Image: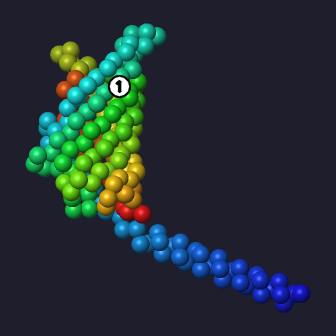
Amino acid sequence: MTIRIGLIAQGMALLMGAWFTVGSGEALAQQKHKYLFKAPPGTTKFTQTHILDVGDVPGHQMRVAELQSKYPGEAPVFNGLKVVESRTILFSDYTDGSGNAIYYSVATLENGDKMFQRGTIMAHTTVGADGGRRTSFTSVVSLSGGTGKFKTIRGTLRGTGFSDMKTGTSGTVTEGEYWFE
């Protein structure tokens, strides 16, 4: 009986070792790609915006917006393919232009494949001595799949930039890494 239990334990240890080895091999096989893109001015514009005043404190607004990004020249590149355009739906909860937002984006690549993204934004608006408002933001983006060659893309990107909340974004720099599962 003792020999049988010992053999079972050895067999389980071998199976566990094999499982960890295979699992580690899969993790090693996921090549990570670095990403960096500085968006040229004028690439992203608001196409629709719907704003509701909450009414609890002055300046508290909920916003649903659509943004369109077009890249005729410089463009983000993933796995050797350029992004041609993207459509983003954004939901924000801002007081005087500061607060949080979440968004979902579908990017179309030059071969017709799509890539899906989900992001969060933290925005901060300040008023300058001249009375002008300036909104800066930081974002974290999760790449969550797509179509065709991008079905299994995953990754995390971080961005910073500026927005005037009416026309679009500017000075956006995004960096991070992505991989294919």
Towards the viewer: 35 or 45: 45
The answer to whether 3 appears left or right of 21 in the picture is right
- Asked if 89 appears above or below 142 in the picture, the reply is above
Which residue is situated farthest in the right direction here?
1
Foreground residue, 160 or 178? 178
Give the residue displayed 31% in from the left and 44% down from the top: 106
Query: Looking at the image, can residue 103 be seen?
Result: yes
Q: At which x and y percent is residue 167?
A: 19, 26
Q: Nearer the viewer, residue 87 or 102?
A: 87
Residue at (77%, 87%) from the top-left corner? 7
Which residue is the extreme one toward the left? 73
Residue 122 appears in the rendering = no
Q: Quadrant of the N terminus?
A: bottom right
Q: Is residue 78 above or below residue 65?
A: below
Based on the displayed image, in which of its 4 quarters is residue 93 positioned?
top left
Side of 98 where 6 appears, left or right:
right
Residue bearing mark 1: 64
Q: Nearer the viewer, residue 101 or 160?
A: 101
Residue 105: % across, % down:
32, 41
Amino acid under label 1?
Val
Determine whether 170 is above or below 154 in the image. Answer: above
Question: How many discs appear?
Answer: 1
| Quarter holding residue 47 | top left
